[in-house]
Image (cartoon, helix red, strand yellow):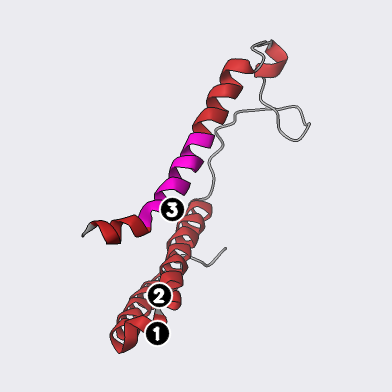
Amino acid sequence: MDDSNLIQYAPIAIMFALAAGFVAITMLATHLLGPKRKTITKLESFECGIESQGNARVPFNIKYFLVAILFVLFDVEVIFMYPWAVNFAELGIAGFVEMVLFVITMLVGFFYIIKKGALTWE
């Protein structure tokens, strides 16, 4: 890539640097300037104002985690569709065919997880 193409990415790089810098400065400032009083009451676990009881390591059904992972997977699919939709006219028929193949691949995976019963609750 020549310099004229790289300069187009300068605003994105500046925005990323400012966002990362803001996060770093905010985290550092709160760590350095915040109070450091650790009492027994502050170190206790707190859940909605209810006293904690029993062991916190209660086993959960794997379905919760599976649904969360599947949500992330199909959410990423939608994220890939935004740039395609923005550049739809420029990509032409080749871009359309590639997106159709991508959607078909994701649908095959979706129907596979439905067939395996990953989304059925008992």
Rounded to the nearest whole Å, what is the CA distance between mark 1 and mark 3? 24 Å
Circle nearer the viewer, 2 or 1 = 1
Q: Residue 6: x and y, percent?
A: 29, 56
Which of marks 2 and 3 precedes in the sequence? 3
Q: Residue 80: x and y, percent?
A: 41, 68
Q: Residue at 75% of width from left, 35% of height from top?
A: 48
Q: Amino acid at mark 3?
A: Pro
Part of the protein shown in magenta:
9-22
Q: Amino acid at mark 1?
A: Ala
SS state under label 1? helix
Q: Residue furthest right?
A: 49
Q: Residue at 60% of width from left, 28% of height from top?
A: 55
Which of marks 1 and 2 precedes in the sequence? 2
Rounded to the nearest whole Å, what is the CA distance between mark 3 and mark 2? 21 Å
Circle nearer the viewer, 3 or 2 = 3
Q: Nearer the viewer, residue 93 or 64?
A: 93
Please give the residue where the numbered disc 2 appears in the rendered image.
84
Q: Residue 30: x and y, percent?
A: 60, 23
SS state under label 2? helix
Q: Amino acid at mark 2?
A: Trp
Position of the C terminus, as image quadrant, is bottom right
- Residue 89 is marked as 1
Q: Residue at 78% of width from left, 31% of height from top?
A: 49
User: Compared with residue 93, is residue 69 higher up or lower down, i.e. above or below?
Assistant: above
Q: Residue 114: x and y, percent?
A: 45, 73
Q: Is residue 100 visible?
A: no
Q: Residue at 40% of width from left, 75% of height from top?
A: 84
Relative horizontal placement of residue 89, taking residue 54 as reference (left or right): left
Please give the residue where the numbered disc 3 appears in the rendered image.
11
Position of the N terminus, as image quadrant, is bottom left
Q: Check disc 1: other Cα within 10 Å, few if <14, some if 14-19, many if 20+.
A: few
Q: Nearer the viewer, residue 96 or 56?
A: 96
